[in-house]
């Protein structure tokens, strides 16, 4: 009975958004057919275009390129941001010195870095990876440092009371206490990184989902492929966020998110 | 009995106002001393100074004849809200204070104390899966694992309901019978003090001074409802102006 009820509850949660999506697609189809547009595609044409990309194998290449760039930039950002954020959280001098700089750099859209990226790294893979690094690194640093600052005094006091050595303090108190904030920071970062990779690929690259969109428009107004690219970007973004949410279910961080 | 803790003219103020204003007290080895006073009278500040987490403006605390400079594992603080690490399971929490290399030995010690406080079978549970009373047991067991000579208990049971409070007191007495510690208890619950302590120190509020000291000559196990305990409770309450 239990599984049956929870199954029904799940179904009831899935139905409304599915219906809404179906409705939106129906309206889209109706409007395109009614207006007899020659450029704007119907949902059916978008599906056909997508299948075309799947058939000639280029779709997987574009997706792979985009994901690789996000992965590389995000990974480098994490390697720098986590230790730096922990250090800033622990050492007040580091925080007061570095935080203002990061607060100034953080609101600059990664897109604004594109000219500099091209100047420094050319038009290869390095440019978008650098842009993703820029996009991901600041939220992660800020969130990690904030996480260290919000560790409750009583836990630090207990660690001090038991005379925990530095390594143990870091490994068993500070890092696990910050981990939930860190995961939030990573989720935000990954979301921004995904936004940025597509924008970055619109400039002078030969692969990636952003390139697919621009190239489809330039090469003969293939708006069916433009929209196919957009939808795929949305779906992959959803998937990436879902993966980060899975991290929130880890046993060692569940103490923080709801009990 | 030897003198364990000597508190000498301890003073501390915040923003020019004295909070703790000259406390002198000598506590013997193995003694259980309860400080009683109204809420917000500077009890916790006093405790933090004795445990070494805060430095006094003047005066000093001597433990075994040595001036206390900071906290150490020789005396463990157990506070009202608890400090069991929510990201470690019971066993990992109990092992936290053990810094040796022998993992198996640490596990064995942790499990021994888990059993002592009645947490056998919960070693792998995380704190959010435990009740308030069980969390208190984890906290006490984690302190006992490092074999401290002193336990500093700052309103340890006041967040528990009345029944659990009474049960934890009995548990604590049972444990103390096995492992003799010097205990300083801070509480606003006079009955708790009468139940547990050898000596009750009544604190005057704002700034904190010692107002009166009562000996509790009744042998353990005591019944807090017995006439002599009740009579002492009345006396202490009268001293507190109630």
Image (tube, coloured by chain):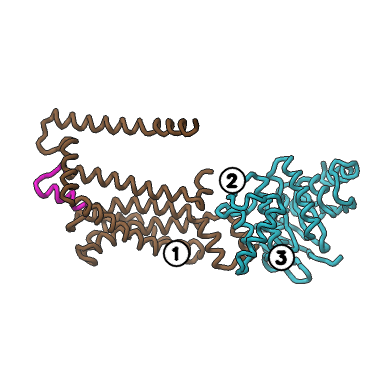
Chain colours: A brown, B cyan
Q: What separation in Å lies between label 2 and label 3 (alpha carbons)? A: 30 Å
Which quadrant, please, contains the N terminus of chain B? bottom right
Judge if badges 2 and 1 mark residues of a common chain. Answer: no
**What residue is drawn where x is 59% and y is 59%?**
A156
Q: Nearer the viewer, residue A58 or A234?
A: A58
Q: What separation in Å lies between label 3 and label 1 (alpha carbons)? A: 33 Å
Q: Going from the N terminus, do you reach mark 2 or mark 3 first? A: 3
Q: Nearer the viewer, residue B217 or B126?
A: B126
Residue A83, which numbered label?
1
Residue labelled with disc 2: B129
Q: Quadrant of residue A259?
A: top right
Disc 3 packing (10 Å; few <14; some 14–19; many ≥20): some
Which quadrant, please, contains the C terminus of chain B? top right
Q: Is residue B118 left or right of residue A8?
A: right
Residue labelled with disc 3: B74
Q: Are marks 2 and 3 in contact (CB under 8 Å)?
A: no
Per the rendered image, the range of residues in magenta is: A208-224
Judge if badges 3 and 1 mark residues of a common chain. Answer: no
Whether residue A121 is visible to the viewer of this picture, yes or no, is yes
Asked whether A223 falls inside the magenta stretch, the response is yes
Estimate the x, y position of residue B239 in percent, counting from the top left.
Answer: 85, 46
Q: Secondary structure at mark 2?
A: helix
Whether residue B26 is visible to the viewer of this picture, yes or no, is no
Estimate the x, y position of residue A60 in percent, counting from the top left.
Answer: 22, 52
Q: What separation in Å lies between label 2 and label 1 (alpha carbons)? A: 31 Å
């Amino acid at each position: 009975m239990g599984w049956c009820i929870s199954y029904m509850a799940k179904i009831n949660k899935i139905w409304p958004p599915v219906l809404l999506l179906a409705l939106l697609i129906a309206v889209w189809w109706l409007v395109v057919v009614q207006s007899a547009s020659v450029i704007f595609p119907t949902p059916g044409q978008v599906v056909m275009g997508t299948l075309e990309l799947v058939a000639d194998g280029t779709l997987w290449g574009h997706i792979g390129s985009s994901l690789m760039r996000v992965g590389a930039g995000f990974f480098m950002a994490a390697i720098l941001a986590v230790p730096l954020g922990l250090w800033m959280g622990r050492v007040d001098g580091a925080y007061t010195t570095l935080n203002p700089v990061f607060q100034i750099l953080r609101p600059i859209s990664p897109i604004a870095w594109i000219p500099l990226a091209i100047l420094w790294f050319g038009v290869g893979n390095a440019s978008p990876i650098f842009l993703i690094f820029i996009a991901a690194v600041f939220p992660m640093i800020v969130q990690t440092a904030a996480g260290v600052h919000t560790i409750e005094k009583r836990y630090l006091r207990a660690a001090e009371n038991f005379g925990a050595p530095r390594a143990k303090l870091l490994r068993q108190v500070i890092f696990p206490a910050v981990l939930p904030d860190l995961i939030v920071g990573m989720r935000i970062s990954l979301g921004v990184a995904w936004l940025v990779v597509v924008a970055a690929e619109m400039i002078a690259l030969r692969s990636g989902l952003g390139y697919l969109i621009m190239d489809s428009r330039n090469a003969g107004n293939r708006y069916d492929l433009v929209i196919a690219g957009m939808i795929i970007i949305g779906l992959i973004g959803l998937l990436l966020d879902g993966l980060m949410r899975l991290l929130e279910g880890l046993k060692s961080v569940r103490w923080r998110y709801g009990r | 009995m030897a003198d364990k803790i000597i508190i000498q003219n301890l003073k501390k103020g915040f923003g020019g106002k004295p909070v703790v204003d000259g406390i002198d007290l000598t506590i013997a080895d193995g003694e259980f001393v309860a400080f009683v006073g109204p809420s917000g009278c500077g009890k916790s500040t006093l405790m933090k100074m004795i445990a070494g987490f805060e430095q006094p403006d003047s005066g000093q605390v001597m433990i075994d004849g040595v001036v206390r400079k900071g906290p150490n594992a020789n005396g463990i603080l157990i506070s009202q809200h608890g400090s069991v690490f929510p990201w470690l399971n019971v066993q990992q929490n109990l092992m936290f204070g053990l810094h040796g290399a022998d993992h198996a030995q640490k596990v064995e010690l942790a499990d021994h104390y888990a059993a002592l406080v009645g947490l056998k079978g919960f070693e792998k549970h995380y704190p959010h899966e435990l009740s308030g009373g069980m969390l208190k047991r984890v906290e006490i067991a984690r302190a006992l694992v490092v074999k401290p000579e002193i336990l500093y208990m700052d309103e340890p049971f006041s967040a528990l309901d009345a029944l659990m409070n009474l049960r934890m007191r009995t548990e604590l007495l049972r444990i103390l019978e096995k492992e003799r510690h010097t205990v300083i208890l801070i509480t606003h619950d006079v009955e708790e003090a009468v139940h547990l302590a050898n000596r009750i120190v009544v604190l005057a509020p704002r700034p904190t001074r010692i107002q009166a000291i009562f000996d509790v000559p009744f042998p353990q196990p005591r019944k807090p409802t017995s006439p002599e305990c009740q009579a002492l409770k009345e006396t202490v309450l009268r001293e507190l102006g109630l």
